[in-house]
Amino acid sequence: MKKKELINKAMELGFEDIGFTSAESFESQREILISRKDEYSWLLSKGTDIFNGVDPKFFMSDARTIVVLIDVYFKESFPTELEGHFGRTYLDDDRMTKGQLYQRIKKFRVFLRDNGIDSKVPFNLPHRLSAARAGLGTFGKNNFFYSNKVARKSSWITPIPIIINYEFAPDKPTIEIGCPDWCKNTCIISCPTGALRKPNTVDPRKCISYLSYYEEGITPTELREPMGLYVYGCDRCQNVCPRNQAWLAMDLPLNKRVKAKMDDFELTKLLHMSKQYYKSNIWPHMFYMSFNDIWRWKMNVARAMGNTHDRKYILELIKAFGENKDKRVQGMIAWALGKLGGEKSKEALNLFLSSSEGLVKDEITNALDKFK
């Protein structure tokens, strides 16, 4: 098979770009993971094998080439109300529902199979590094991958590496930082939680995305305001990036699929949602939290409500305190009521105080201190 045939098929299926690299191990990535093992140990605890993930031959013993497809996930605009609470990459994520992106990848693999080529699509292969090695773009200081060609050379893209047992000539790598000299580390300065410590170095444990769907305990007090209104994911370092402004200035058509489910993600509904509501309406699109971790959703929503400064949420938060037995949720509700203020919040907190203990009592006491 000729490379051009594969390129044409990718374009026919609606992918924006395609590149090729060898199936050599990503040894530089292994070294980084080893040197920062403590920062990435949480991934191992979640069952993500990041160390074996750097070797394509771990997934396919006769691997010869990695084909990398590029998809633009921000091809259509999203409702502003949702963009303020959720990272854009999750708003139209159809992996669980096996929607349009899943089907396009499947058709591409069928094409490979029909031409006698086996393929694997491992989720823990270094996606961005694969794309850079395939010459499809460069890195930003925020660690995101920026296209060389599509979406006005922005980072609103998804690299999809596919390992195959057929050899194609590799493209010229572009493993480099593509940020302009005049950019004064805008992403790093703008990271509210300090996750971006320096160029190309992120502490995932401080990233809003990690905190919103993996952090086990109640969100640390000092990070609650910096996390702002985000409930799931974060786009802060991408929104402020000068390299992304050309695409953000585009007049994009509205994503109808996302608009149709917009009502399901209203904050009040998320705060009061049942496990069944989560399974049916939320998890198919934002699935990093298990069905047993619904507490984290509610804790995040309570924190976001507190940061809105909108007292319309006070009665909903008071109601939710009684609905929830999880101490992390109750504690965050107390914090949010203290943040929003008002007599109703004060009365509720005093009422809750008499029957609370431990973490919840401490949060209520701290919240009441704001009224003095």
Image (cartoon, helix red, strand yellow):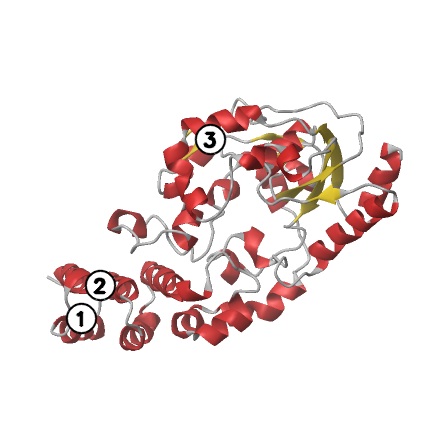
Task: Identify which amino acid the numbered label 1 is placed on.
Answer: Leu
Q: Nearer the viewer, mark 1 or mark 2?
A: 1
Q: Are marks 1 and 2 in contact (CB under 8 Å)?
A: yes
Is residue 196 at least partly visible in the picture?
no
Q: Which residue is mark 3?
A: 33
- Looking at the picture, tell me which residue is in the foreground, 188 or 280: 280
Horizontal and vertical percent for residue 15?
A: 75, 46
Left or right, residue 141 beside residue 147 = left
Badge 2 or badge 3: first in the primary sequence? 3
Q: Which residue is mark 1?
A: 349
The quarter of the image holding the N terminus is top right
- In the picture shown, does residue 185 fall above or below 47? above
Left or right, residue 107 beside residue 66 = right
Q: Residue at x 33, y 75 (%)?
A: 316
Q: CA distance from mark 1 to mark 2?
A: 8 Å
- Helix, strand or loop at disc 2? helix
Task: Identify which amino acid the numbered label 3 is placed on.
Answer: Leu
- Looking at the picture, tell me which residue is in the foreground, 230 or 68: 68
- Looking at the picture, tell me which residue is in the foreground, 33 or 97: 33
Q: Which residue is mark 2?
A: 338
Horizontal and vertical percent for residue 98?
A: 67, 61
Mark 1 residue crowding within 10 angstroms, few (<14) / some (14–19) / many (20+): many
- Helix, strand or loop at disc 1? helix
Q: Nearer the viewer, mark 2 or mark 3?
A: 3
Q: CA distance from mark 2 to mark 3?
A: 41 Å
Which of the 4 image quadrants contains residue 94?
bottom right
Left or right, residue 32 beside residue 78 = left
